[in-house]
Amino acid sequence: MRLPVRGLRRVSVRGPSMAPALSAGDVVLVRFGAAARPGRVVLVRWPQRPAQLSVKRAVRRDGDGWHVLGDNAAGSTDSRTLGPASVVGVVVCRLWPSPGQVR
C-alpha cells in the first residue's frame, strides 16, 4: 500500500484496541510525515505486517522505531507482541462521529 509522504488523509478505525479514546468505525484525520511524540495517537506499520496500518498511542522511541500501545491492553496487538513500529502519521483529530480532539 502506497502512502502519502506528507499531507492529510482520513482513516477509519477498526477494532477495539484504542477504546475508550477511539472506537471501531471512528474516522480520524491523520497528518502524514508529522513527528510523533510520547502520548500522541499515531498511525503505524510493523515490518512483520507491511500491508497493515494500525492506530496506537506512542509511548517512547525504541531504536529506529517507536514503542506503541493500544489503550485497551486486552484488545490490542502492539509493541508488546510485535516490537517497535514505524510511525507513518499522527492523528490530528476525530472527524466522526464526535468531532474533536483525541485524548
Image (cartoon, grey):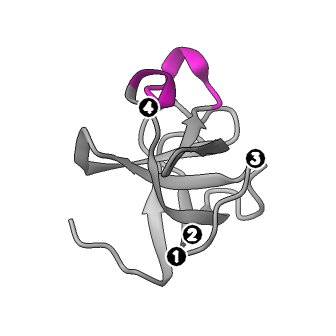
Disc nearer the start of the sequence (3/4)? 3
Say whether residue 15 is left or right of residue 41.
left
**Which residue is under mark 4?**
83
Residue at 45% across, 45% down: 85
Quick check: marks 2 and 3 in contact, CB under 8 Å?
no
Instruction: Tell me what residue is drawn at x 56 percent, y 62 percent.
Output: 28
The residue under the point 20% across, 65% down is 1
Distance CA(mark 3)–CA(mark 1)? 17 Å
Which residue shows up at 60% across the image and 73% down it?
34
Q: Which residue is mark 2?
A: 29
User: Considering depth in this image, is 80 or 72 the residue closer to the camera?
Assistant: 80
Q: Residues within 10 Å of mark 3 (few under 14, many from 20)?
A: some
Task: Say whether marks 3 and 4 touch (CB < 8 Å).
Answer: no
The residue to which callout 1 is attached is 33
Of labels 3 and 4, the one closer to you = 4
Tell me which numbered mark, 2 or 3, is placed earlier along the sequence: 2
Q: Is residue 72 magenta?
A: yes
For label 1, the crowd category at 10 Å Cα-Cα, with few meaning under 14, some 14 to 19 and many 20 or more, is some
> Which label's residue is closer to the chain start, 4 or 2?
2
